Image (cartoon, grey):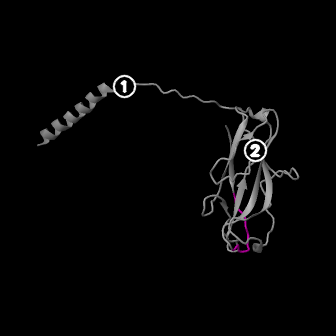
Amino acid sequence: MKKSFLALSLGLISAIGASSVYATTGTINFEGRITANTCPIEVINPGDGSVGNLVKMGTLAASQFTAVGQEYSGKRFGLRVADGAACSLASNTATVTFNGTADTSGDYFAVTPTNDGAKGIAIVVRDNTGAIVKPGAASAAYPLNDTGVTDMIFNAYYRSTAAAVTAGAASADVQFTVDII
């Protein structure tokens, strides 16, 4: 009995070894580029030129919103490519993708839920064409200055997602990615 298992094991080993005779080889080419530095991006307030990541949306009365889809308190903000020459831009165009928690529609940014948070409200971001930039989607293309500063300007609004908006804190954290295209 032990002899048959040994013969079977030797048969499997020789069959596996014989299959390697039919292996082929090939080549994979990897191509890329390493740049000397990254391109610094700053969040700016175009009104006063201040730099920082806080866009002050202001204070509104909940009663101002009387229907779904109303937008108020537009605030301009920008993303500044500090120096196109130092960034070694491979292209003169960029898009921006904003990521954060989407509201139930998926089109706007949900306000952070807190015990004292506003209800029936979201934050909408619009690009330089006036189009809504949905969470996870790219903005319209922005031209880049390859020898100097570029400000990519956006607008943020409160948008009612319900006919009745309740009062409370209405803030959101949103990340961004700038893609040179």
Closer to the N terminus: mark 2 or mark 1?
Answer: 1
User: Is 138 rendered above or below residue 159?
Assistant: above
**Residue 139 image offset from top left, x and y in percent:** 68, 47
User: Is 32 rendered above or below residue 101?
Assistant: above
Q: Is residue 14 left or right of residue 135?
A: left
Query: From mark 2 to mark 1, how far is it between C-alphas?
Result: 48 Å
Identify the magenta region.
164-173
Give the residue type at disc 1: Thr
Residue that label 1 marks: 24
Is residue 171 on the magenta stretch?
yes
**Residue 35 image offset from top left, x and y in percent:** 69, 32
Q: Quick one: label 1, few (<14), some, or many (20+) residues within 10 Å?
A: few
Q: Secondary structure at mark 2?
A: strand
User: Is 2 rendered above or below residue 154?
Assistant: above
**Residue 57 image offset from top left, x and y in percent:** 79, 62
Q: Quick one: 88 or 22, which is closer to the camera?
A: 88
Name the residue at 87% across, 50% down: 49
